[in-house]
Amino acid sequence: MMLQYENYLQTHQSRFLSELLDFLRIPSVSALSEHAADVQQTADWVAERMKAAGIPDVCCLPTGGAPVVYGEWLQAPGKPTILIYGHYDVQPVDPVELWTDPPFEPVVRHDKVYARGASDDKGNMLIPIIAVEAMLATEGTLPVNLKFFFEGEEEIGSPHLMEFMQKYSQKFVCDLVVSADGVQWGEDQPRLLIGFKGLCALQIDVFGPETDLHSGIYGGTIQNPIHALVHILNSMHNPSGRIEVEGFYGGVVSLTETERNQMAAIPYDGSDYKAKLGVTELFGEPGYTTWERAWVRPTLEVNGIWGGFQEEGVKTVIPKEAHAKITCRLVPDQDPCDIIKRIINHVEAHTPIGVKAVVHSEPSTASAYFIPQDHPGNQIAYDTLEALYGKPPYYTRLGGTLPMCNLFLDILGVYTVTFAFGLEDEKPHAPDEFFRLRSFRRGQLAYCKLLERLSQQDNSYDE
Amino acid sequence: MMLQYENYLQTHQSRFLSELLDFLRIPSVSALSEHAADVQQTADWVAERMKAAGIPDVCCLPTGGAPVVYGEWLQAPGKPTILIYGHYDVQPVDPVELWTDPPFEPVVRHDKVYARGASDDKGNMLIPIIAVEAMLATEGTLPVNLKFFFEGEEEIGSPHLMEFMQKYSQKFVCDLVVSADGVQWGEDQPRLLIGFKGLCALQIDVFGPETDLHSGIYGGTIQNPIHALVHILNSMHNPSGRIEVEGFYGGVVSLTETERNQMAAIPYDGSDYKAKLGVTELFGEPGYTTWERAWVRPTLEVNGIWGGFQEEGVKTVIPKEAHAKITCRLVPDQDPCDIIKRIINHVEAHTPIGVKAVVHSEPSTASAYFIPQDHPGNQIAYDTLEALYGKPPYYTRLGGTLPMCNLFLDILGVYTVTFAFGLEDEKPHAPDEFFRLRSFRRGQLAYCKLLERLSQQDNSYDE
């Protein structure tokens, strides 16, 4: 027997798709100031769409940057209050020439919609709004109290949200956060994300002589800043891939046997993994599997390096300076500020004579996030996904970073359960991003089911 | 008593300066194809100037690139034949915004002329033409037979001259080459250059995954091409600065005690040297002095490095590739091709797993050049300079490379004596290049004296 809201969702699907296309047409690129008006317009669009869904109290809250679109429906006394998180901003579109169709002119092909933000995160964040519309339209009520929190700066590291959260913490009090930003394992295999890595970022600048010098006159007599930089960078890993920064692994929580076994049980095909990336060999910290390296071991990666002559041909120069950018992905319980200090100390200890090395840390830092697998919110999401997909979800972590999860935990004291329907192959952040419309439809029903199941729990989601 | 040619030089000095300014106005930048017509026009200007000096047979010889302006005066039977070398092309002017005046609008200030090519090499190569004019005008004859060889591709490594020299070797037969491209020690201190370093150049390209990857998803599981590149580059020197490429020092001729003592006698002030370059410490191969490191020890310098993200802010990317450019300055008896092979082997042996490293060698290679200090040509130049400056010249080498010296030695079997009047502080290859007009005038007289002294030697300059 089809439920009323299920019937409603089916009946209105073509309108929902048409709304998604409208949503995708607004180029809400948070990284580029020329799109500031588009970001604001997108926030207004989201607010209108929430009102149309029947959410009574909707407003755009100023953050100092892009507004948070906030809405609440609190008419279920005695029931838990759930805060649904998502973001309406998108990544830049460069290199735009690699897109098959213009990134803000969405195209539907083979039941997939192609556009910037389709998967990350517009398609996903529209899903709970539609689910709520369907339930309110057919039942006139919702099974839980709801707060909606849609930000517009996720793609630039949510720089204004720490202060914003502190200011509005009373407004967002809730029992659980559900994130509509995240990924499933596969089209037919659900997963629950139980951890994200933290992040810290820095730049190393090595300064040598006052000007670029002719290598024929001065070569061999002074320290070459590039030589010094490669010496510093090379000292950060040993040849087998372990990070050699003193104390880097000090705060790292060890894996339990159960956790290792659980990760080992997640399907893994090394040949597929290599083929997908186009590498001949995998490489990483000794003693850990690929999943462990990707999900639960901290990393230190040089993301960029530059100095001296980079054109065609030959220029016999000793450059006056050389530079590198580094990010670390951190795990529980590493403190990003402590790691930055350790790297600064390491650079100091490994700078050869004759040059000066300066380390700048970047403001975007985040601690790792971890939600216990048996958290009641996870259990409910697990049951919902299992019923919907017909198989149990995997529990996995992710090497990426979702700064808001920790912010919600720190300031509101509540965990975030990730409940979203993107897939990793949908090219988020890359040309030809797409979203499967099957996921779009399935997600709407999944959210209705999730809200129903959440109402059966008492209103405490504390551990 | 003033000699007749000396009087002639004094009388016509303002015309000579005006001619130098004309010469400097033509932007003969050999590196840039847009200046090809200017290079040709400069060759024509030089040919006309030589004819005006009274050199009877002047022509522009095609090389496949910029012509060699050739002239000869062979009316001194029984006297030695001297080939005078110089170049009429100049370096590019970038960064042009750092010039006080436009680089091809010469300006005279405080008895210095400022323009691209003023010191390197137009001012210097015009000197022997003027000297010959003065002698022919006042005496109707020259003390030796002369051939002039002015090339237009020195600044790009003389790519066409190997083939050209082989084709015309009979034409250039001579007893000695005198180079009008070179530098003195100081305004009041002459020197004789007795060695130049050789050169080889290469690029290392390290390739990893097929596309740039998100460090949050794949970080820690594959080899990062930047990590691999810094490992390869760092392995090329030990921490004390010695080159670790196997066999790199194998062919290097050891210094004699006399040579070391001679170099130790050349004035050196470490504090001045550091202050001039703006470095806090000098650094180089252990066991050698700064002059030895600069002049007679081979070097391996990374001239450029690049890969991944180089903009402001943070991008958590593992780049698909990373690159570096290297040049080595070589000494007797290192073979540039052998050194390239050794570096290729070194890169192969030090490439970490998971990436591919490819080494491209650049076509510009040159062997080191060395002329025995007691070569008769050197003795004559020594005496000439000593008489003119009132003090004995230093014998020194140079870390730079003059490919033609070896070409003359290999193909014509004759040594090159460097007899030129630039100074290292005159910013060759840099903005605000200048030439001291005092050197311009003194050089003219010096060439007259040199030719007179050369005529007193029998016509064999063989060792």
Image (cartoon, coloured by chain):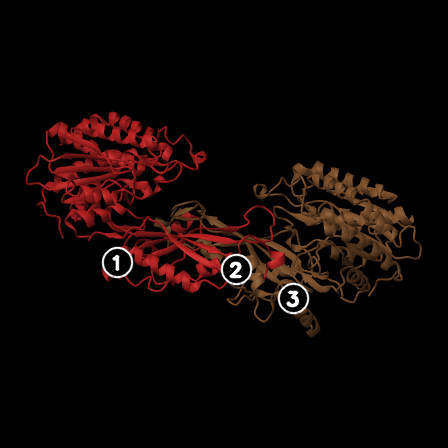
Chain colours: A red, B brown
Identify the mark nearer the N-term, 3 or 2. Answer: 3
Whole-Å distance between the Cαs marked 2 and 1?
Answer: 41 Å
Q: For the image shown, how many numbered marks are present on the structure?
A: 3
| Element marked by disc 1 | loop
For the point 58% across and 46% down, the residue is A312
> Which residue sits furthest front?
B1
Q: CA distance from mark 1 to mark 3?
A: 60 Å
Relative horizontal placement of residue B24, taking residue B350 as reference (left or right): right
Q: Position of residue B82 (x, y in %)?
A: 84, 55
Q: Mark 2 — residue?
A: B279
Whether callout 3 and callout 2 share a subunit is answered yes
Q: Is residue A412 left or right of residue A211?
A: left
The chain identifier of the residue carrying mark 1 reads A
Outermost residue on the left side: it is: A78
Dot label at residue B267:
3
Label 2 neighbourhood size at 10 Å, few (<14), some (14-19), many (20+)? many
Q: Which one is in front in this view, the residue at disc 3 or the one at disc 2?
A: 3
Q: Which residue is mark 1?
A: A333
Task: Residue at 89% x, 54% y: name it.
Answer: B143
Chain letter of mark 2 equals B
Q: Give residue B242's position: percent from left, percent from top.
A: 56, 67
Q: Is residue B85 visible?
A: yes
In this rendering, the label closer to the viewer, 2 or 1: 2
Q: Is residue A459 left or right of residue A63?
A: left
Label 2 SS:
loop
Q: Nearer the viewer, mark 1 or mark 3?
A: 3
Distance between the Cα atoms at labels 3 and 2? 20 Å
User: Residue A234 location in percent, x, y?
Assistant: 45, 60
